[in-house]
Image: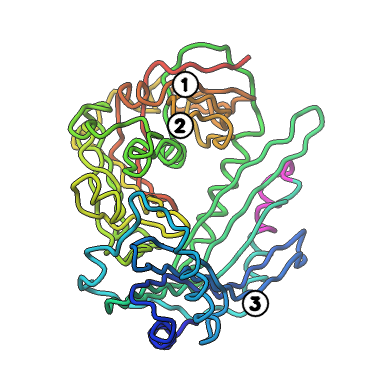
Amino acid sequence: MLNTETIANYAQNSAKKLGINKYDIYGSSIDETSVEVNHGEPKQVQASNRSSVIVRVWNEKGTVGVTTTTDLDELGIKLALETAKEASTFGNTENPPEFSPEAKVTIENTVDEIVEPAEVPILIDTLIKAEKSLLEAHPAIQGVPYNGLSQEDIKRFYLNSEGSLRQEGRSYAVIYLYSRTEEEGKKPRGASAMKISRGLETLDVDGCLKEVTEKTISHINYRTIPSGKYTIVFSPKAFLSLISAFSNLFNAQNILDNQSLSNRDSVGKQVASPLLCLSDDALHPDNIGGETFDGEGTPTRRVELIKDGVLTGLLHSAGTAKRMNAQPTGNANIGAKVTVGSHFYHVFSNSEADPQYNLDEAENVILIDKLQALHAGVNTLQGSFSLPFDGWLVNKGELTSIDAATVAGDYLTLLKSIVCIESEAEVTPGGVCPRVWVSDLSVTGE
């Protein structure tokens, strides 16, 4: 793992020799072990140690040079600083980045959460048992072509020439299962599930297995549906994937680049149904992947984005915050250009869920479990989408798998067409969210 203090000393000594007065360094190191299996036998066992460091150097004119390195010894850091110094001559003179004004603010409760990794034979045995149980769950399930069990330790750090020094370490364990059915006269069907935890001992392997088994079996008997307008119920994962796809709505960098559905004057305006509240909360207690600082060393926090349907906040880096007279929010990713990204979404409603929106009573409602082809079926600048999906037609609690269908519409119209946000939320790797009901969406089916 990284020794941050040693790297800071390397950087300080080398910068002095090179005549560099202003610099910062952000980096991470990952120790990972992963396994895959195939019909009861190990398919792949992989172990790796990966390091990545980004070095930025400011010259006397205030322009910045950026370079990356994986060589973390004294010579490697010196060469990276030297290269970045040379590159600073060609740095962008328009809105060059600066240190975050919060890079030295004290972060409370920064405790490393490192868990002793399980041995590889235990990982293999755990995954083989899960695969075996899935294959035995139904005669139609003929394989688990995609699966994996991994554990990793991640250490991140940030330091700069003004004395900022931050570091944190986390451990994660992840299991992923994807099943596939084969039946004569029927199309192959599949389903997937993933669970994440701090370590293997607390990883919900049984929950992952139960989820993928139930979904797979529910998709075996399918039928086509007629095209038309439907009330759609988005699963937590499906709704969060839409929010992520159109995150330019509240991304300050996208707004400044004119690559957003919003503009500088959008904050304070109604963008969704009054039922919708949305936050980006890196420190949410259910966020296993929580980070306490971003790539610029800014402390992360809960950022309210939408409240009662009104756009109330944006995600900022230090640069976007300065240009928009706001505060950095801890959402910066540094590189050749500083970008802004989300951490962990929290979707909820300040209103009680309307009891009439109940899958046990609803008729001719579509429950979308997973949206597909998000990389191709979304136009983020126009706000339009047309996406294939996995889901079911629901009639009074009875679920019938849909053969093949596509849901299409306008994202901002969808947000304003939300008619119910259920009370019970589900924790996913990308956030916490309940099921969300949207009226009158176009579905192309049969």
Q: In the structure shown, which secondary structural element does the residue marked by tag 2 occupy?
A: loop
How many angstroms separate mark 1 from mark 3 (CA)? 46 Å
Q: Residue at x 26, y 26 (%)?
A: 273
Q: Residue at x 27, y 46 (%)?
A: 279
Q: Which mark is residue 120?
A: 3
198 falls in the magenta region = no
In the image shown, does 204 or 81 lie closer to the viewer? 81
Task: Note whether 180 is above or below 26 in the view shown.
Answer: above
Q: In the structure shown, which secondary structural element does the residue marked by tag 3 occupy?
A: helix
Kind of residue at badge 1: Asn
134 falls in the magenta region = yes
How many angstroms separate mark 1 from mark 2 (CA)? 33 Å
Where is residue 184? Give x, y as percent.
82, 31
The tag earlier along the polypeptide, 1 or 2, is: 2
The tag earlier along the polypeptide, 1 or 3, is: 3
Kind of residue at badge 3: Val
What residue does disc 1 label? 395
| Side of 442 where 40 appears, left or right | right
Where is residue 33? Give x, y as percent.
61, 72
What residue does disc 2 label? 380
User: Which quadrant holds the C terminus?
Assistant: top right
Q: Residues within 10 Å of mark 2 (few under 14, many from 20)?
A: some
Kind of residue at badge 2: Thr
Q: Which residues are magenta?
A: 131-141
In the image shown, does 392 or 74 lie closer to the viewer? 74
Quadrant in the rendering for residue 329: bottom left
Quadrant in the rendering for residue 181: top right
Q: Residue at x 38, y 63 (%)?
A: 295
Q: What colour scheme has been applied to the protein in the rendered image?
A: rainbow
Task: Note whether 39 is above or below 104 in the view shown.
Answer: above
